[in-house]
Image: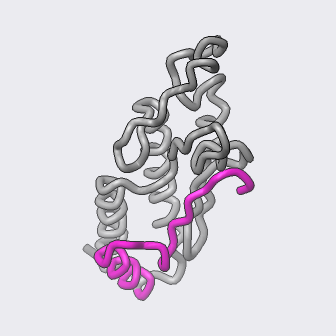
């Protein structure tokens, strides 16, 4: 994806529990694509919800619009990162046997995710603590099914 994306793979997991669950699951299953598809769907849902709550993955509110831009923004004047909804509408994921990539192909997605010049960072991609728990739940469900539970 050319814009902004978040890779979730076996080496990116920052929680020991997630890493351990991935290792067990990988040993049990040959192809983790179904797991990563479920993770991709879950992450799409939480990322899209961030556009409604206008908050970063850590729960902090996005920086407000600049006063000059707020004066001229006609469509969706009260919604940050939403002019016509294109950025939110292009969020997608790609799942494979060893990872899932969540993001947007829009180049300006990176500008909004990381900030640039006069445009402050307004992160929409990332994992919150509750997202990490949801990923653990997905992994546990798949592991349980794989082990016949």
Q: Residue furthest left?
A: 149
Residue at (53, 28) in percent of width and height = 80
Q: Which of 94 and 126 is in front in this view?
A: 126
Q: Where is residue 128 in the image (x, y as percent from the top left)?
A: 36, 54
Q: Which of 71 and 87 is in front in this view?
A: 71
Q: Where is residue 23 in the image (x, y as percent from the top left)?
A: 39, 84
Residue 49 visible, this orientation: no
Residue at (33, 71) in percent of width and height = 145
The quadrant where residue 70 appears: top right
- Number of marks in the image? 0
Quarter holding the C terminus is bottom left
Q: Does the magenta stretch include residue 136?
A: no
Q: Position of residue 113 (x, y in %)?
A: 58, 47
Q: Is residue 32 above or below residue 5?
A: below
Q: Is residue 59 above or below residue 143?
A: above
Q: In this view, does 58 lie above or below 145?
A: above
Q: In this view, does 124 lie above or below 2?
A: above
Residue 18 visible, this orientation: yes
Quarter holding the N terminus is bottom right
Residue at (57, 25) in percent of width and height = 66
Q: Nearer the viewer, residue 2 or 95?
A: 2
Q: Give the range drawn in magenta.
A: 1-27
Q: Where is residue 3 in the image (x, y as percent from the top left)?
A: 70, 51
Q: Which of 96 and 127 is in front in this view?
A: 127
Left or right relative to 65: residue 21: left
Q: Which residue lies furthest to the bottom in this view?
A: 27
By what rule are the colours in the image chosen? Answer: one colour
Residue at (54, 77) in percent of width and height = 31
The quadrant where residue 87 appears: top right
Q: Is residue 13 magenta?
A: yes
């Amino acid at each position: 994806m050319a814009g902004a994306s978040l890779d979730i793979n076996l080496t990116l997991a920052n929680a020991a529990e997630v890493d351990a669950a991935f290792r067990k699951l990988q040993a049990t299953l040959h192809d983790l694509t179904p797991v990563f598809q479920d993770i991709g769907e879950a992450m799409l849902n939480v990322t899209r919800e961030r556009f409604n709550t206008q908050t970063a993955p850590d729960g902090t509110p996005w920086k407000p619009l600049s006063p000059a831009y707020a004066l001229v923004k006609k469509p969706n004047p009260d919604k940050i990162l939403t002019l016509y909804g294109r950025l939110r509408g292009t969020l997608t994921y790609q799942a494979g046997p060893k990872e899932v990539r969540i993001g947007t192909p829009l180049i300006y997605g990176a500008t909004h995710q990381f900030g640039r010049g006069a445009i402050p960072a307004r992160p929409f991609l990332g994992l919150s603590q509750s997202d990490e728990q949801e990923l653990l739940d997905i992994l546990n469900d798949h592991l349980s099914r794989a082990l016949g539970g």
